[in-house]
């Protein structure tokens, strides 16, 4: 078994802020993998299993988005926007020296990766859209369907809270937690790295509130009407769509991505919900490594 190299850290500066990034592995013949975490606000901790990609001879780069982890923090109304996060992503890429790289986005990070890829910045070898969506309205409908398929003691209260607009209120918390145990992560207990990220998001909710609203089951905020379905055909980058059988981002969302991006393939993890990289780690790493290697095989090794 190959040994892991110690992680190194750096900071990307933009708009007067600093974003912390973390690098594992050495730069070799394979192109680096840049990972965008979800939330917003989860931080990079829960993506820790992807550290193992360094054993395949690949450098992996993670970063804490503004407002979480060891990056600069901002107030709840401090100008959160998609444009801000896109600029941050580019700043991280520049600071880490990733002229050519693969891009992986999980959850909200996948939405960010989609917007970034649609801008066609150049140098993106492939795109991994993990447990994410191309349309918030479609996702909202999918979440309602998943809620209604829960046992009556869960689905009934969920529907009542949805109708009264009280999904984010404390009395509903235990009901939502039961939903998340089925459709977010099915492991019991949840991995410690995931618990750290969930706690981070609860401690610093500003970005989440601004971008997607207060409830996990009723996406709102600035992205309430976000929908890039009609533009998916513009993406020519080889793309891997990843989803769990019980995913919070349901199969129809993954199918939309798969049908919309011509050069895409879709892998479903049968025993997972929203975090298959935690729930089925070994298979996830094998699928990811195989896809990245095939992509590079079509275009040749990294230069330099």
Image: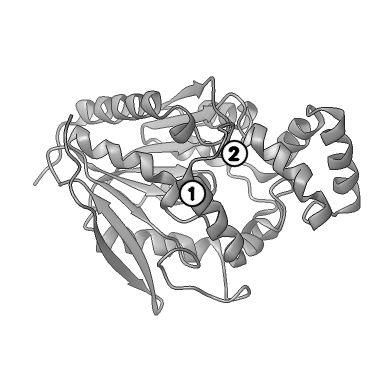
x, y percent for residue 297:
20, 26
Which callout, 1 or 2, points at the residue further toward the start of the chain?
A: 1
Q: Secondary structure beneath disc 1?
A: helix
- Between disc 1 and disc 2, the foreground one is 1
Q: Is residue 59 left or right of residue 109?
A: left
Residue at position x 58%, y 64% in the image: 203
**Residue pointed to by mark 2:** 229
Is residue 118 at least partly visible in the picture? no
Q: Quadrant of the N terminus?
A: top left
> How many angstroms separate mark 1 from mark 2 (CA)?
16 Å
Relative horizontal placement of residue 155, taking residue 38 as reference (left or right):
right
- The residue lying furthest to the left in this view is 304
Q: How far across and how far down the image is residue 172, in percent?
A: 81, 50
Per the image, the residue denoted by label 1 is 109
Helix, strand or loop at label 2? It is helix
In terms of depth relative to the viewer, which is nearer, 21 or 95?
21
Residue 49: x, y in percent?
37, 39
How many callouts does the rendering have?
2
Label of residue 285 in the image? none
Q: Residue at x 41, y 64 (%)?
A: 88
Determine whether, in the image, residue 203 is placed left or right of residue 163.
left
Is residue 265 among the parts visible in the rendering?
A: yes
């Amino acid at each position: 078994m190959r040994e892991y190299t110690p992680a190194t850290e750096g900071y990307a500066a933009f708009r007067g802020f600093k974003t912390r990034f973390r690098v594992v592995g050495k730069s070799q013949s394979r192109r680096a993998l840049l990972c965008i975490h979800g939330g917003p606000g989860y931080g990079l901790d829960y993506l820790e299993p992807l550290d193992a990609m360094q054993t395949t001879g690949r450098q992996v780069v993670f970063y804490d988005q503004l407002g979480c982890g060891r990056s600069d923090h901002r107030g709840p109304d401090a100008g959160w926007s998609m444009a801000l996060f896109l600029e941050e992503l580019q700043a991280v890429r520049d600071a880490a020296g990733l002229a050519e790289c693969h891009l992986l986005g999980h959850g909200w990070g996948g939405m960010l990766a989609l917007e970034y890829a649609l801008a066609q910045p150049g140098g993106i070898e492939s795109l991994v859209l993990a447990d994410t969506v191309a349309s918030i309205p479609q996702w909202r409908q999918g979440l309602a369907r998943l809620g209604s398929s829960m046992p009556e003691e869960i689905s009934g209260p969920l529907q009542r809270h949805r109708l009264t607009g009280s999904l984010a209120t404390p009395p509903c918390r235990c009901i939502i937690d039961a939903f998340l145990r089925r459709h977010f992560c099915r492991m019991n207990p949840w991995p410690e790295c995931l618990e750290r990220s969930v706690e981070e998001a609860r401690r610093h909710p500003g970005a989440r509130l601004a971008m997607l609203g207060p409830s996990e089951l009723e996406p709102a905020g600035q992205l309430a009407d976000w929908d890039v379905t009609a533009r998916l055909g513009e993406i020519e980058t080889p793309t891997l769509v990843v989803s769990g059988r019980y995913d919070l981002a349901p199969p129809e969302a993954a199918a939309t991505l798969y049908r919309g991006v011509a050069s895409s393939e879709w892998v479903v993890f049968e025993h997972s919900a929203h975090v298959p990289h935690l729930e089925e780690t070994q298979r996830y790493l094998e699928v990811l490594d195989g896809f990245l290697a095939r992509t590079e095989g079509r275009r040749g090794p990294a230069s330099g």
